[in-house]
Amino acid sequence: MIDTPGLRALRPDADEAAVAATFGDVAALAPHCRFRNCTHREEPGCAVREGVDDDRLRNYHKLLREARRDTMSALERQRQVAMWKARGRAGAARAKAKREPG
Ligand SMILES: [Zn+2]
């Protein structure tokens, strides 16, 4: 598998959108769920669980989880880089203050 962090950074929601597009039947049934924020797992009155094959729904959840994990890690990476940069600046400022007291 080829990791493409650059593409993900540009379009962090691309994978999740791709999953939704692949599972059009889930997207079509979702508005009929009893709860608006239904995750189609344990909720009562879930139209997706009723209308979609168990195996297919499991596959949907699996792909969605993977898409979200990748999105999270891309965001985490960006945060971490920003943190390292901030730390680097702070460290340089402290070192400078030591060399030039007053
Ligand atoms: Zn549902």
Image (tube, rainbow, N blue to C red):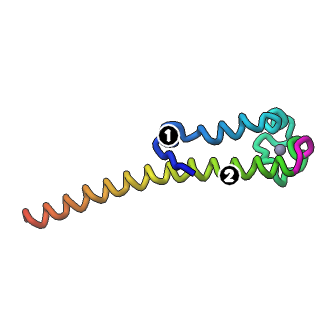
Q: Earlier in the sequence, mark 1 or mark 2?
A: 1
Q: Which residue is mark 1?
A: 7
Quarter placement of the C terminus: bottom left
Q: Which residue is mark 2?
A: 65
Measuring 60% from the left and 53% from the top, which residue is drawn there?
A: 69
Which is nearer the eye, 64 or 82?
64
Q: Which mark is residue 19?
A: none
Which residues make up the magenta segment? 50-54
Residue 49 x, y percent position in the rendering: 88, 46
CB of mark 1 near ligand 1 (< 8 Å): no
Residue 55 painted magenta: no
Measuring 12% from the left and 67% from the top, which residue is drawn there?
A: 98
SS under mark 2: helix
Residue 39 versus residue 27 in the image, above or below: below
Q: Residues within 10 Å of mark 2 (few under 14, many from 20)?
A: some
Residue 17 x, y percent position in the rendering: 65, 37
Q: Residue furthest front?
A: 1
Which is nearer the eye, 40 or 90?
40
**Ligand 1 positioned in quadrant:** top right
Question: What amino acid type should be assigned to the residue bearing mark 2?
Answer: Arg
Label 1 and label 2: CA atoms lie apart by 19 Å
Number of the front mark, 1 or 2? 1
SS under mark 1: helix
**Is residue 11 at all visible to an observer of this figure?**
yes
Residue 95 x, y percent position in the rendering: 16, 64
Q: Residue 100, located in which quarter of the rendered image?
A: bottom left
Q: Main structural element of the magenta stretch: helix, strand or loop?
A: helix
